[in-house]
Image: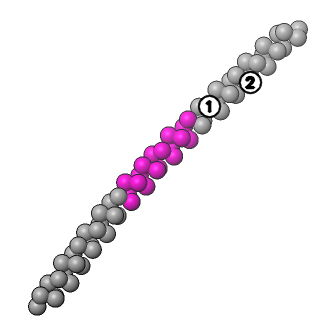
Amino acid sequence: MMKNSNNQNNYLRLMAQIAKASKSTQKKEAYQKKQEDSGKKVLEWIFGVLVVLAIIFVIYSIFIVS
């Protein structure tokens, strides 16, 4: 009788650990997704600014040459 109760307690403890790990994994995945989205947004801004600066430089160069 005691052995069955021990097995049941171990099983419940194991299931609780699995549930806890699952929640942690979900949080990590959500955080990764959030970081990825913000990283893409930053890259878009950087490339956008570089393009604008390149256009300004081309216009400046045309005025200097002429």
Are there few (<14), some (14-19), or many (20+) residues within 10 Å of tag 1? few
Q: Is residue 10 placed above or below 33 in the rendered structure?
A: below
Amino acid on which disc 2 is placed: Ala
Q: Residue at x 51, y 46 (%)?
A: 36
Q: Residue at x 17, y 83 (%)?
A: 6
Q: Is residue 59 placed above or below 50 in the rendered structure?
A: above
In the image, the segment drawn in magenta is 25-42
22 drawn magenta: no
- Residue 51 drawn at (x, y percent): 70, 28
- Mark 1 residue element: helix
- Residue 40 drawn at (x, y percent): 56, 41
Q: Residue at x 12, y 87 (%)?
A: 2
Looking at this rendering, what residue extends furthest in the bottom direction?
1
Task: Give the colouring mode of the picture.
Answer: one colour
Are there few (<14), some (14-19), or many (20+) residues within 10 Å of tag 2? few
Amino acid on which disc 1 is placed: Ile
- Mark 2 residue element: helix
Magenta stretch, main secondary structure, is helix
Determine the image quadrant of residue 4. Answer: bottom left
Disc 2 marks which residue? 54
Looking at this rendering, what residue extends furthest in the left direction?
1
- Residue 14 drawn at (x, y percent): 27, 74
Q: Which mark is residue 46?
A: 1
- Cα–Cα gap, marks 2 and 1: 12 Å
